[in-house]
Image (spheres, rainbow, N blue to C red):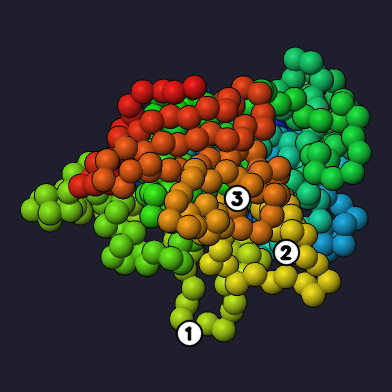
Amino acid sequence: MKDLVLGKKGAEAFERRGIGAETVARLNVYTGKFIDGEVVPHEDGNIIVFPFIEHGVSVNEKFRGPQKKFWQRTGGRKTFWNSDALDDPALADGRLPLVITEGEIDALTAIDCGWPLSVSVPDGAPPAVVDLKDQEPTDDSVGKYEFLWNNRDRLKPVKRFIIAVDNDPPGQRLAEELVRRLSAARCLFVTYPTGCKDLNEVLMQHGADRVREVLSAAQPYPVRGLFTLSQYPDAPAIKTYSTGWETLDKHCQMFVPMVAVVTGIPGMGKSTFMTHLMINMAELHGWQTAVFSPEMPVMPFLRDKMRRIVGRSSLETLHNTPDRMQVIDRWIDENFIFIDHDGNSDDDISLDWIIDRAEDAVLRYGIRMLIIDPWNEIEHAKRRDESMTEYIGRGIRSLRKLSRKYNLAIFVLAHPTKDVASGGSRRVPSLYDIDGSAHWNNKPDLGLVVDRPDPVVPQTTVYVSKVRFEGTGEVGKVLFSFDKWSSRYGLLDEVN
């Protein structure tokens, strides 16, 4: 890299930003110009080139041309700019944090102000979205967050991250996605002076000392311990998402993080209802879902049910249109992940095992929803010194911790006791009837009961029995029609 030179135009551009040319050149940033259709190093060039160095080798380059035009080397590896900072032992032993910025200029600002272990994401922030349907590809190994996947082993030992991205809607979304994948317990947020949206603006308006103050004053996200109000990052009111059924939305809407429980007598349709709900969330909001369903094999039963719901028709009709079936299968493949036990594995299907797989699904696919259907089939690991009630309480707490850590909506389907249908008579179960503990009524954020009063009549009642948070719904019940050919639920009339 000895031939790489930061020319006069480049040095002046960085000096206007308050960044020393010596720091820039030390990090192998250089100027180039187009010659024979490609950018080559040139002292008089008007293109600034940021090499992405990994283990001492340039694996990608980002080019900044006139009028803030950006592009990257074709086929370059997605990684952090200045990624070799990840290997500094001070990150693993906690002496220094890793500063993550939205762009190379801000990372250079931090480095020039005395924070050498600073990196930048390669592609800036994703667009701010009103909804989640235009989110990035679900597989982090090829998507917007491929740089995290490529550095996952190098990131694991890091004790602290300072998230210093832009203070605007795209930057806030980037911060949310970074914290979700790196875990809030390891992340700190910064507060910029009024009128500044990033570190370089702080430098230009207030000087290097203020940049150092901003980074030194980074505060942990509120994960544990005690915090004053001023230590919490500003957050909007709970954002709710439509279930896809207008009448049901009056009683419950989706939000994250959330832990919900769904019960009903076996055979009354609660699994099918939840399958329809998760498909609605994918269609309307782009939510990816991980499903653990040991009672219903994925192939062919769950797959065929999903085909009918997505295709809005019978399986026979879909088989007569193979091209449409291929489109449906591809859409299912892009939006749903199945947590399944490998028959050759010795692992027990415990709640801890499911939580581990769900964490993998967050990192790999960016899931927003987890469904456990049913709770009763999990190989429970109750300690000898705890009752079933204590164990269920501990299990729900573990799921709540998971939902908050990764901003997930978690649904647990649980069967009621046999008492609700004993003696030749049946009644509508309540959340208190779920086998094991009253915790199923007390601890979830949302509680639903799915009931079909007459198996012959294609009508289902969904009782919204528990709503914890104001603004997310109210207790009530909703009547649905049910089409057995498509396995889809349609609205009838609301009954309060």
Q: Quadrant of residue 458?
A: top left
Specify which label sits upstream in the sequence, 1 or 2: 1
Other-residue count near label 3 (Cα within 10 Å), few / some / many at <14 / 14–19 / ≥20: many
| Residue at the image position 91 percent from the left and 29 percent from the top | 228
What quarter of the picture does the N terminus occupy?
A: bottom right
In the figure, is residue 169 to the left or right of 195?
left
Specify which label sits upstream in the sequence, 3 or 2: 2
Q: Residue 378: where, in percent of width, then height?
A: 57, 67
- Please name which of the two marks, 3 or 2, marks the residue nearer to the observer: 3
Q: Secondary structure at mark 3?
A: helix
- Type of amino acid at the residue the image marks with label 3: Asp
Disc 3: which residue: 433
- Please name which of the two marks, 1 or 2, marks the residue nearer to the observer: 2
The residues tagged by marks 1 and 3 sit, at their Cα atoms, a distance apart of: 36 Å
Q: Residue 16: where, in percent of width, then height?
A: 72, 24
The residues tagged by marks 1 and 2 sit, at their Cα atoms, a distance apart of: 30 Å
Residue 25 in sight: no
Other-residue count near label 2 (Cα within 10 Å), few / some / many at <14 / 14–19 / ≥20: some
Q: Are marks 1 and 2 in contact (CB under 8 Å)?
A: no
In the figure, is residue 74 to the left or right of 442?
left
Q: Quadrant of residue 312?
A: top left
- Type of amino acid at the residue the image marks with label 1: Asn
Q: Secondary structure at mark 2?
A: helix
- Type of amino acid at the residue the image marks with label 2: Met
Looking at this rendering, what residue extends furthest in the left direction?
A: 320
Disc 1: which residue: 344
Disc 2: which residue: 388
- Please name which of the two marks, 1 or 3, marks the residue nearer to the observer: 3
